[in-house]
Image (tube, rainbow, N blue to C red):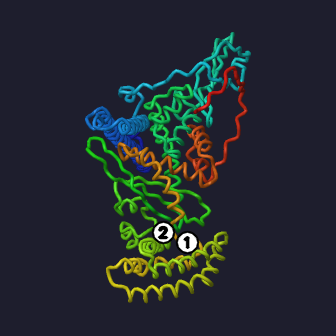
Amino acid sequence: MVTEQQLQSMNETALRSLARQLMTTLGEQTTVIENTQQALASKAKELHHKEALIAKLTFEMATLRRARYGRTAETLNSEQRALFEDAIDEDLAALEVQLEKAAPSESNASKRERRQPKRGQIPADLPRTNIYHEPENAQCQCGCQLKRVGEDVSEKLDYTPGIFTVERHVRGKWACAHCETIIQAPVPAHVIDKGLPTTGLLSQVLVAKYADHLPLYRLEGIFRRSGVTIARSTMADWVGACGEQLRPLVERLREIVLTKEILHADETPVTTLKPGLKGTHRAYLWAYSPSKYDDLKAVIYDFAKGRSGEHASDFLGNWKGSLLVDDFSGYKALFRQGITELGCMAHARRKFFDLHQANQSDVAAQALVIIGRLYDIEREAEDMSPDDRWRIRQQKAKPIMNSYKEWLILQRERATTGTAIAKALDYSIKRWAALERYLDDGRIPIDNNYLEDKIRPIAQGRKAWLFAGSLRAGDRAAAVMTLVQSAKLNGHDPHAYLKDILDRLPTQLNSRIDELLPHIWKPQAAETSSVTAETDAPERTAA
């Protein structure tokens, strides 16, 4: 601080120097103020966004609760109502997970109405395994030796295929007699905080519903026959919470799949019942995967309210590559935007197969023979490298395709427009450019059967999801099935895979999330914790 007397004594040079110092200080303070204002504005914007999200999620929860107990549910038969209620309970659990993440503070979170966790009674005669969690160091900070003075025990219901057991997590209490310090190992992180199930049981419920296509009310009956009662609503809570926790893995896998130049795409209808609306509505489950010849083995399912091409466009975003599809018109807009169309020879063959089955058409029979020769070449090249596959196609398949095109045109000139044979011929002729592209790239399959095989199991599960109560329920099914089917493609047991990643997710760093993806995942090495097993009761098996 410069006094008035000091100012009076300063010469011109000193005054200029002081002025420069003051201007520099003022500039620095102005910068600090501007940065603070920007930070406050950013915080306010973030807070406003979170509050809007909380309001949206809270409203959606209220809507679902009304639907669960409203007139729509009353009009359903017992089986339909069970499916409908399970889907809504799953949605509510997923919404609660999102609300916890979005809450600006714990104080706000505590003000919201929360559903109390439903912990069932664990049968006393199930075999128990003690898992001890003790501090790494038994010496107090003051230098004294700690003494074990007690323990806290929590039980979790575990499941390995066919067998129920109980994990007893024992956390010893260690005290220092000198400074009265008490320490305890922290509670192990779990995907469902303070929940009843182990990740083994959670994995079983997910696999049963989304891989074995068992509705939760049937799984409830299976568990009851084993002497273990778990309410459907409880399992629905688990499904909803796990689906939300697994979502980042699916998003990351999607990003990786979209780096590939060649993709398969297909879709299949799923009937849904929307809360508040009468009757059923047709939605679609879309599927995407890299080429069958790609090293990346993965399939991504995407649930959408309709079959419009905009859903495929939304999923693919800015991706530009070659897309192997059937002749669904919804893809046409993508091809006008720079994506290359790849035709499916199996669909072209199917037109002639159906015609031959219907009236023993000679033209259809000839077409089937020619296409059969193309598939003979594909079987020969199945295990070849892309370059060798391209080479054999050029040598053997290309001449057949050239003569086949001429034959198609000749037959079409003879056929009467509007007849079944004319339509079958037109299908191949109009799509010829897309059908023959596989000849020029050994990475491109001849047909879309690879992905159709991955979407076919969906038909088995349609009844289990018939009353997926919302787009959220469909998204959850798509997410879990993405991981289950991708695990299978990489030779993993889905139960073992899901159990392990659910174990690791709560503590996995975002920078290392790729380690949990199906094509990279390796089972976690067994921990060297102190574990003793008590097998004083016979094993319970799931009937």
Residue at the spot of label 1: 444
The residue under label 2 is which amino acid type? Leu
User: Which residue: 66% across, 47% down?
Assistant: 522
Furthest residue toward front: 359
User: Which residue: 42% across, 25% down?
Assistant: 116
The residue under label 1 is which amino acid type? Ile
Give x and y (percent) for residue 270: 39, 52
Quadrant holding the N terminus: top left
Q: Nearer the viewer, residue 163 or 412?
A: 412
Quadrant holding the C terminus: top right
Give the crowd class for mark 1: few <14, some 14-19, many >=20 residues within 10 Å: many
User: Which residue: 37% across, 81% down?
Assistant: 422
As drawn, 41 above or below 180: below
Q: Nearer the viewer, residue 112 or 522?
A: 522
Under circle 2, the secondary element is strand
Q: Is residue 507 left or right of residue 93?
A: right
Q: Is residue 124 left or right of residue 265?
A: right
Give the crowd class for mark 2: few <14, some 14-19, many >=20 residues within 10 Å: many
As drawn, 124 above or below 483: above
Instruction: Answer whether labels 2 and 1 touch (C-beta < 8 Å).
Output: yes
